Image (tube, rainbow, N blue to C red):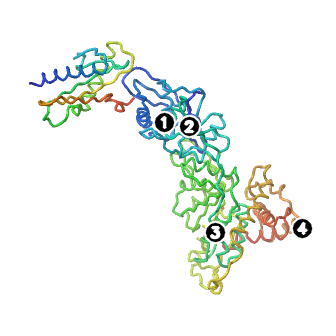
Amino acid sequence: MGPVLGVTLKGIEAIPIDVEVEITGGLFVIAVVGLPDAAVKEARERVRAALRVNGIHLRGRIALNLAPADLPKVGSLLDLPMAVGLAMETGAVRLAEPALFLGELAMDGRLRATKGAVPAALLARKMGVPLYLPPENAREVSLVRGVKAFAAPDLGALLGHLAGECSLPPVLDSSLDPDDPPADPDLCDIKGQAAAKRALEIAAAGHHNLLLVGSPGSGKTMLARALRGILPPLTDEERLETLLVRSTLGLRTRPDRTRPYRIVHHTASTIALCGGGSALKPGEISLAHRGVLFLDEFAEFHRDLLEALRQPLEDGTITVSRASGSVTYPARVLLVCACNPCPCGYWGDPVETCRCPAHVLEKYRNRLSGPILDRIDLHVSVPRLTPEELVCLEGQHGPSSEEIRRKVSVAREIQQERWKKEGFHSNAEIPEKLVRTGIKLSREVRPFMVQAARGMRLSGRGISRVLKVARTVADLRGSPEVGVEDVCEALAYRKGGVTGDSA
Amino acid sequence: MDHLETGRLGESLAERYFRGKGWTILGRNVRVKFGELDLVALDEGELVIVEVRTRSIGQVLPAEESVGPRKLKVLVRSGRIYVEKCRWTGPWRIDLLGINLDPGGSPELVHLPDITAGRIDA
């Protein structure tokens, strides 16, 4: 291991890169070897200019090797280690111990923010070396505990620090802002829809996927947006996971515990949603990790896009494989889908009449009743409100988002405590085996489930989904045991009730 | 004054200028295969090949702008041959000194160090 280390990203993982420099006689030229991409190759101009500003004039034939040589290096985050390596070789500074450097250089020597600061911080912590980074990346790195990091405003200050002439301020651990989630719209402002609100509460508490079906204007989208205000706060561990994904894309993150909430339009491509491209970037499903992925107008999405969601919904991770390699991103999302019950939108509506021909209706149902619906635990109908309900202007409509959020947070804490040993965070994540052994049922539930399974023709997966939802309902009441009434409520959210098919 | 005289005057001015900067002058008008090096000097351990361009005032381009890509290529090639011939193993570079002569006043000197930096790919 050489003393000057940089990083390159592979998925959400930072790989250490040794920067080796050789200067020999000859006409001035910088050659970069070790599979650099265009941005890394162009770094030599930025590095040369930035070093010149700091009084280091490069001369002779310079070869820069980025090891391991067979790993492709991507992006501008290697500028700084290359500059430090060159400064060392010319004798301007000495480095006593190995250190990680990260940053893009401006021509005048300033350091610009880069992506990948959080993965680099985790790597620095693992290797036990100090990390030098641009000041704009300091905030996100300050959220990672136990990293010895320094923020350098420019190359001159960094070289001064390494030479022992001045010292850079260390990046101190900072805590998250007290969270203040945007409850917009607040649940108590939404009229009626008590059943849907209850389903939102269960979804938020147990991280269960949710489907909202209703005619146009019934408030599906508004309800889905209201979910944002009742999600439980992220734990420290979850917080780090979401930070990691955003950092690999170079996105800014608000330093609080708000869960991600991503709305995807139905024109989105599979790569935008699942990740990919030549750089193997994470997609929306990974950005929504530990939070909500909202697909509005669910029935309009391309079939292959929805099929692509099946595996990540089951596993909580997505592996993006291309010719250039394969990486795994986290993808544990709460999927919220909203759609109309039929193409015209009024099937089952109390007032308007549905005008869809039978074959159109069947085609639409076929599109909806794919295997993806089987992975959605809560199916909820959002009926149109009566004129009396709509005109009612005064007062609150049920508990506020803040109250529900408190209830949901308590339920989530119970789950985290229960599944801590197995490493799960919520009821929706637990595998089949744990459903059988880890969920405590009351005495009457077993015969009741047998009856229900017979009557409703439940499959093995169906039964375990019902039990998971029932577990969350029981957690919301604070009961250690799942009772018959919990199972009853869970059965009410079964598939088929809202889209009309009997599967 | 014809152009050859102008050139010689320029080279003398250049030699004086670089001596004043503390450089060691190694040679003037060094002939190598494919060309001639106007001035060869040593600047703090770095060998410098100087192309001197002299212009009397009134011409369209200033002197330092008159080196194009073709001339640059010739300079690099003859530089390499020279460095090889005298077995120099240290770093070297190519500088350009533009001299704009003014019949009335003092000549204007423009020194551009390392004109190939960033222009030659490895």
Q: CA distance from mark 4 to mark 1?
A: 71 Å
Query: Which residue is situated farthest in the bottom direction here?
Result: A388
Query: Which residue is situated farthest in the left direction here?
Result: B1
Q: Residues within 10 Å of mark 1 (few under 14, many from 20)?
A: many
Query: Which residue is situated farthest in the top direction here?
Result: B86
Which is more N-terminal, label 3 or label 1?
1
| Observer-nearest of A481 and A395 | A395
Q: Which quadrant of the view contains residue A488?
A: bottom right
Which is more N-terminal, label 4 or label 3?
3
Q: Which quadrant of the view contains residue A390?
A: bottom right
Q: Mark 1 sits on what residue?
A: A155
**Can you say whether A461 is above or below A46 in the image?**
below
Q: CA distance from mark 3 to mark 4?
A: 36 Å
**Can you say whether A39 is above or below A190 in the image?**
above
Q: Mark 3 sits on what residue?
A: A226
| Residue type (three-letter) at the residue carrying disc 3 | Ala
- Name the disc covering residue A444, or none: 4
Q: Mark 2 sits on what residue?
A: A168
